Amino acid sequence: MERKELIQSAKEMLSKAFVPYSKFPVGAALLTKGGEVYQGCNIENAAYPVTCCAERVAIFKAVSEGEREFEALAVIANTERPVPPCGSCRQVMSEFFEPDMRVYITSKELEVKETTVKELLPFSFTPGDLESGRE
Ligand SMILES: O=c1ccn([C@H]2C[C@H](O)[C@@H](CO)O2)c(=O)[nH]1
Ligand SMILES: [Zn+2]
């Protein structure tokens, strides 16, 4: 699947976003190595911190279906610049994605910034760190 198609798939999710509080829809589409696409949108809550970002919805949908091997992630919002994922999503990306996996972040005008997981979250806390610090 081409980058353009994955971004289109993320864009489709903007209309599904549940954003009564922020009025800031975000869409995501996660491509697996097997060629499946898992889409996500942000889902907010009256208790604001309970909100889940579009990226994590897409990742958790895929992981909960047994997927473990990922090819690329596209994220889009109606922003001036390509939308930077939040810190929590970067940490979740680093748990499931290879450091060099492509992440396409996109703006309202479909300006695409192509980045990677390690570029988004360098020096990240990993399962190896957890193992090495156990009592
Ligand atoms: O990369 C991002 C940044 C923000 N949001 C959501 C969380 C919240 O619903 C709204 C405003 O922060 O946007 C995402 O889904 N992804
Ligand atoms: Zn996030």
Image: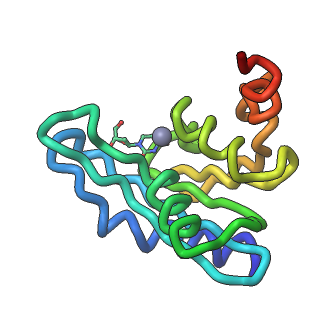
Viewer-closest of 57 and 83: 57
What residue is shown at x 82% (from left), y 51% (from top)?
98
Quarter of the rendering occupied by the N terminus? bottom right
Q: Position of residue 88 (x, y in %)?
A: 52, 34
Q: Position of residue 28 (x, y in %)?
A: 51, 61
Viewer-closest of 116 and 81: 116
What residue is shown at x 50% (from left), y 59% (from top)?
60
Specify the farthest residue to the front: 135
Q: Position of residue 57 (x, y in %)?
A: 44, 58
Specify the farthest residue to the right: 100
For this view, does 21 lie left or right of residue 9? left
Q: In the rendered view, tell whether residue 66 sits above or below residue 92.
A: below
What residue is shown at x 57% (from left), y 37% (from top)?
84
The part of the image, by quadrant, that contains residue 32 is bottom right
Q: In the rendered view, tell whether residue 3 sits above or below residue 117.
A: below
What residue is shown at x 55% (from left), y 59% (from top)?
59
Viewer-closest of 113 and 1: 1
The part of the image, by quadrant, that contains residue 38 is bottom right
The part of the image, by quadrant, that contains residue 70 is bottom right
